Image (spheres, rainbow, N blue to C red):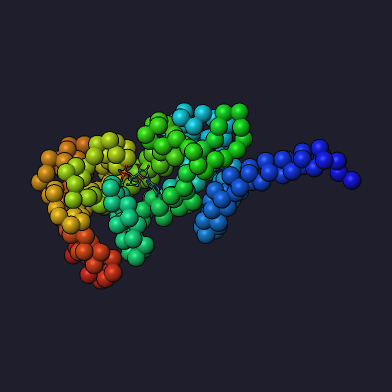
Amino acid sequence: MCSQRTRVILGVGGVIITVAVVLTLPLKGTFIRRCKGFKKYDCEKLWSVFQQAYIGKDPCNIPMEAYDPLITEAPFRPACNRMMFWSKTKNLVQHFSKKREWFFTLEKTVLGSVLRALTWCGEEGSNKTFTSGCPGWRDCENNPVDSFWRRASAAFADVACGDVTAVLDGSIETPFDPKSIFGSIELKRFKSPRVRSLKIVLVSKKKAVSNCMSQSLKDLQRGLDARIAYSCTEMTESQFNECSSDPEKCGPCW
Ligand code: AVW
């Protein structure tokens, strides 16, 4: 028979275990489920290597290098002429690349896919994973989520080859933001002769604010390896979407 005190202890213990499981499981569950869609990866191993980047650490002090072992575990492979980058156009490009299988984005790789739209962090002196209350870019630069996307984007850009496409937002004044991941990390990693050309597709939502002649695009060109051929095409969002619904028509789109 349990005494009142034992019951309280068991009850409190149960709540603590449940809270711990609930805090970690959704992330692990999502990670493993998405990972299994990719077949050739050891998903439990990948999860364990991923966790080592942030578990037990100050969540404002996770540099991008913390994810080096994860990138080594699931390296990016080149997909020449098919790689698509973006900045400020995530939804548009995700929708597009789902329909146009030819184009290959970070979100289609195992690492880009398992962590898509998720939040995670650890805490000093704890072996738990938290999925809420984690610092974001407003709190500190080296937070676990932003550092992961910077590291993964760097590795993805490192294997870029052939003709590379980047989709930017023409409805804002600075489609090329030097502080964005595309501007500060990816663009700098495109190297000739591995990358032959960079094609910018400038998509305007309602009203075009920028065009290919805008200062922002000139800044982009200045940051690009001069040996890489550069081109820029303007189009409306509906023209861009038409490309995804009619693959046959897409060739001449840009
Ligand atoms: P941004 P960036 N799921 O629109 O140039 C969730 O200013 O900075 O574009 N979050 C993501 C994902 C994803 N799949 N991918 C990036 N993020 C985050 C990756 C990341 O923190 C692609 F290869 C980023 O700062 C693009 O060429 C923010 O969403 C390039 O990086 C979007 O900011 C877009 O980065």
Residue drawn at (77%, 38%), measured in percent from left and top?
9
Would residue 188 be visible to someone looking at this image?
no
Return the x and y of residue 38 as percentages of the image width and height. Answer: 51, 57
Return the x and y of residue 122 as percentages of the image width and height. Answer: 54, 35
In this picture, residue 59 sits left or right of residue 99: right
Residue drawn at (56%, 46%), measured in percent from left and top?
46
Outermost residue on the right side: it is: 1
Q: Quadrant location of residue 91?
A: bottom left
Would residue 128 be visible to someone looking at this image?
yes
Q: Nearer the viewer, residue 34 or 254?
A: 34
Return the x and y of residue 176 as percentages of the image width and height. Answer: 22, 42
Outermost residue on the front side: it is: 4
Where in the image, quadrant-wise, is ligand 1 located?
Answer: top left
Q: Is residue 50 above or below residue 105?
A: above
Return the x and y of residue 99 as percentages of the image width and height. Answer: 34, 65
Q: Nearer the viewer, residue 206 or 82?
A: 206
Image label count: 0
Residue drawn at (44%, 40%), measured in percent from left and top?
145
